[in-house]
Image (spheres, rainbow, N blue to C red):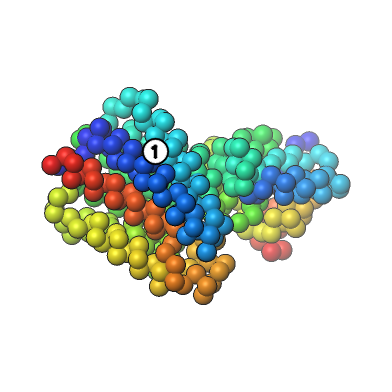
Amino acid sequence: MSYVGIVLISHSPKIVEGLKELIREVIQDVPIELAGGTEENEIGTSMEKIMKAVNDADKGKGVILFYDIGSAKMNAEMAIEMLETEAILVEAPLVEGSYVAAVESGMGKSLMEIVNAMEKNF
Amino acid sequence: MELRVEDAIQWFTKVNEKIQENKDYLTSLDQVIGDSDHGINMARGFQEVENKLSTQEYQEVADVLKEVAMTLISKVGGASGPLFGTAFLKFSQAVKGINPVDYTSFTSGIEEALQGVMHRGKATTGEKTMIDVWAPVVHSFQEAHDFEDNPFLKVAKQAMEDTKDIMATKGRAAYFKGKSIGYIDPGAASTYLIFEALEEVIKGSK
Ligand SMILES: Nc1ncnc2c1ncn2[C@@H]1O[C@H](COP(=O)(O)OP(=O)(O)O)[C@@H](O)[C@H]1O
Ligand SMILES: [Mg+2]
C-alpha cells in the first residue's frame, strides 16, 4: 500500500530531525522527508532541498508540505512550481499539523482528504 | 543607451562589489529588525553570481538575468533569495529574445520584476520591505523616456530612507511590530545598491 508523503521544512535541520523522530514513534510506514536548513546545513531553507524531499516523498499519492516561518514558504512555493508532482503546502502548525497528517496518511487517506482535515483542524 | 550582455554582466559585477563592501552594514540593519543575516545572505549569493558571470558565456541579456536569478534562489538562504530570484527571473522572461535591451523593454522587465516580488512575498507597498524601493523605481522608469534622463537613483535613495518611518507588516521584521520604526529595511537598502550599480553602468556607457 502506498501513502501520501510528508515533507517537513524548517530553517533548522535539527527541528525537522526531532520532529521526524517524534512522528516515527507512532507512524512507521508513511514516507517522511526532511528539508531543514540551507545547502550547507546552516540556518535557512533551500529550494533544491525541498524539491528533492518532495520527489523522495512522492510514492504516487502526492505530497503534503509543512513549513515553519516566512521564507520557508516562498522556497516551498517555488519548489512546487518547478515540479510536476502533486504537492500541496498547508498552513498548519509544523509539529501538530504534520503529526496529524502522518496519522491520517497512515490510515490510507488521500492527499485532498488530508489537506481538508488540516483546514478543518487548524 | 541600450543594455547589452556586457553591460548586464558589469551591472551585477558592480552589485557584487557593493554588496561585499556593505555586507556588515546590511547585516547591522537586519540586526535591529531581523535575524542579522541579510548582509551574509546577499554577500554569499552575489559572490556566487560573480563567479558564474565571470566564467560563462551568454548569448543575450535574458540569459545573464536568468543566471543571476537561479543562483540567488539556490545560494542566498533567507527570504531575499526567493524574492530577488523571482524578480530577476521575471525580468529575464520579459526581455527574452530582445538583445540588446532597449529602454521600453527594460521598463517592462522591471515592472515584471516588481510584480514577481509582490506575488512571491504576498506583499505590497507600505509594509517596510524591498517593494518600497522597487515600486517607486518602476514608477520612475514608466515616467521617464530614456536611461539618461531618469532620476531613478534619487527616487530609490529617498524611498530607501522613507522605509525608516514604516512599521513592518511582512517578513521577520513584522514580529518586531512598532519597534521596527526608525530603521531602514535591509532589503530596501540592498535594492538601493542594485540600482546604484545600474546608474554607474549607465553613466559609464556615455
Ligand atoms: N514577504 C515579503 N515580501 C517582500 N519582501 C520581503 C518579505 N519578507 C522579507 N522581505 C525582504 O527581505 C529582507 C530580509 O531578507 P533576509 O534577511 O535575507 O531574509 P530573512 O528575513 O529570511 O532573514 C527584508 O528586509 C525585506 O526587504
Ligand atoms: Mg534576515
Toward the bottom, the furthest residue is B178
Which residue is located at x 39 percent, y 58 percent?
A: B188
Name the residue located 29 percent from the left edge and 51 percent from the top edge: B196
Does the beta carbon at disc 1 come under 8 Å from ligand 1? no
Q: Amino acid at mark 1?
A: Val
Q: For the view shown, which residue lies furthest in the right direction?
A: A25
Q: Residue at x 51, y 75 (%)?
A: B178
Q: Is residue B189 above or below residue A32?
A: below
**Location of residue B122 with respect to A110 vertically, above or below:** below
Residue located at (13% from left, 42% from top): B206
Location of the C terminus of chain A (image quadrant): bottom right
Q: Which residue is mark 1?
A: B68
**Horizontal side of residue B126 vs B146, given as left or right:** right
Horizontal and vertical percent for residue A56? 67, 34
Q: Residue B193 location in percent, x, y?
A: 34, 51
Q: Using residue B176 as the reference point, say whether residue B109 is left or right of it.
A: left
Label 1: few (<14), some (14–19) or many (≥20) C-alpha neighbours in 10 Å:
many
Q: How many marks?
A: 1
Label 1: chain letter: B
* Left or right: B104 as drawn, with respect to B113: left
> Residue B44's x, y, as percent?
48, 41
Q: Secondary structure at mark 1?
A: helix
In the figure, residue B3 lies in which quadrant? top left
* Whether residue B136 can be seen here: no
Image-quadrant location for residue B163: bottom left
Q: Position of residue A72 (x, y in %)?
A: 58, 50
Residue A117 in sight in this render: yes
* Quadrant housing the N terminus of chain A: top right
